[in-house]
Amino acid sequence: MKKAKLFYGWYILIACILVMALCYAPVVSCASLSISPITTEFGFSQGAFTVTKTIASLVGMAVAPFFGKIMAKKYMHLAWVISLIGVVAVFFAMSFASTLPQFYIISFVQGLFTTSAAMLPVNVVLTNWFQKKRAFIISIAMAGSGIGGTVLSKLMGWLIVDYGWRVTYRVLALIILVILVPVVGIFIRRTPEEKGLKAYGYGETLQSAGKAKPSREWNATLKELFQKPLFWVFIFGVAMTNFTGAAILHVPSAVVSAGYTLETASTVSSLYLLVAVPGKMILGYVYDKFGVKAGILFGNATMLVSMILLLTISSQPMLYIMAVAFGFGQCIGTVTPSVVASRTFGTKNYSDIFGFTTMFVNGGYALGVPVIGWLFDISGSYTLAWIVLGIMSIVMSLCLVFAYVASRKYAQNAKEEVKA
């Protein structure tokens, strides 16, 4: 008997995990590690330097719809490789910068490449390659950022202390160049059809008792969605997942402000990044097993709980309980937008829709970082910020659930058209 070949989609998944671990994690999850050594060396204020993060996010927000269209084209593969090389160039350039204008210019270039180097293409190719267990598969890839964040935070911490932040940036650039560029270049294919295959689970969700059932996907076009109020409610909801997720850049400072040492803050950061690894897979499982509404409510509830617990971290036991809850809560920023977008609006025009969605996901993060800092500045503590983010956790839950429920009417209409 001829042995069945391993489904090629699993190689795609492994490549996506590596991209999230070695590209997304150093750009996002570990970004705060370089702030203190750079601002200390040059005497920059933290507020002035963290503008670099806002610049990169805003540029990424602006170019996301453009890259969303590219990801639907046959040259998506080449665009991904070029974007990774762009991130390599950005890290190398960062290692030579010494003035705020230089950092700002490099951050502008970073924004051009990071969206199309990690989050957007990973979601697009996995949506193309997996029909069955799609949410769980995407969550496994997203867990790569947690794995990378846990490992790279230790590596970067050691490199910064022993060799300096400049060498650290160069090492990160070398890792992406030596590992990710070849992996994506050799293994990634945009669709299973390019390998003469069908998506994993193709047809299984469309069959019952041996009879074909029409798809209940809406498969709306982006132009059509612009006319639907439910789409803008959805956009606000996913933007808020990353507005609240911007807390990840402030939690270490909040821990120090509560009277703990930098070492304790580092330990707490490592803990919630580690918890995020199984947390993302659990959230993906909830989406697949119990449905979109359950996934939204579960994920956003953990974020709400973590905001409440952040109000109690003066107690050391509560500090670590908070870290566990926040490890689960931060998963919504990477898992929820892509899963809810495909389940709400369908997969036929996913690249266009998610590219446009990513613009607001980045915008939410870009807005959240300074707003949280501003709330700290005007109140003298993070208490007001955590209360606001807790309220936003409730609001975004209502928005996303409303958008999904409202979309079912259009999916049902599409089903009836197929029957006719």
Image (spheres, rainbow, N blue to C red):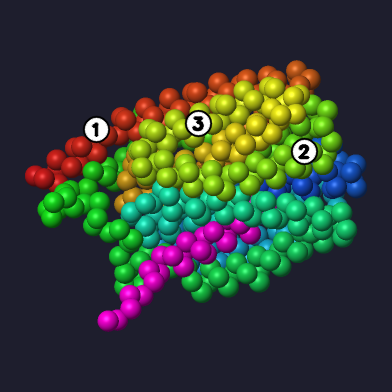
Residue at figure coordinates x 23%, y 43% from the top left: 216
Q: Secondary structure at mark 2?
A: helix
What amino acid type is highlighted by mark number 1? Lys
Residue 412 x/y as whole percent: 20, 37
Q: Which residues are magenta?
A: 1-26
Q: Which residue is mark 1?
A: 409
Residue 275 relative to residue 76: left or right = right
Q: Earlier in the sequence, mark 3 or mark 2?
A: 2
Q: Earlier in the sequence, mark 1 or mark 3?
A: 3
Residue at figure coordinates x 62%, y 26% from the top left: 307
Q: Earlier in the sequence, mark 1 or mark 2?
A: 2
Residue 284 x/y as whole percent: 44, 45
Q: Secondary structure at mark 3?
A: helix
Residue 205 x/y as whole percent: 25, 51
Circle 1 or circle 2, nearest the eye: 2
Residue at figure coordinates x 63%, y 20% from the top left: 387
Residue 245 showing in the rendered view: no
Q: Which residue is mark 2?
A: 265
Residue 176 showing in the rendered view: yes
Q: Give the CA distance from mark 1 to mark 3.
A: 24 Å
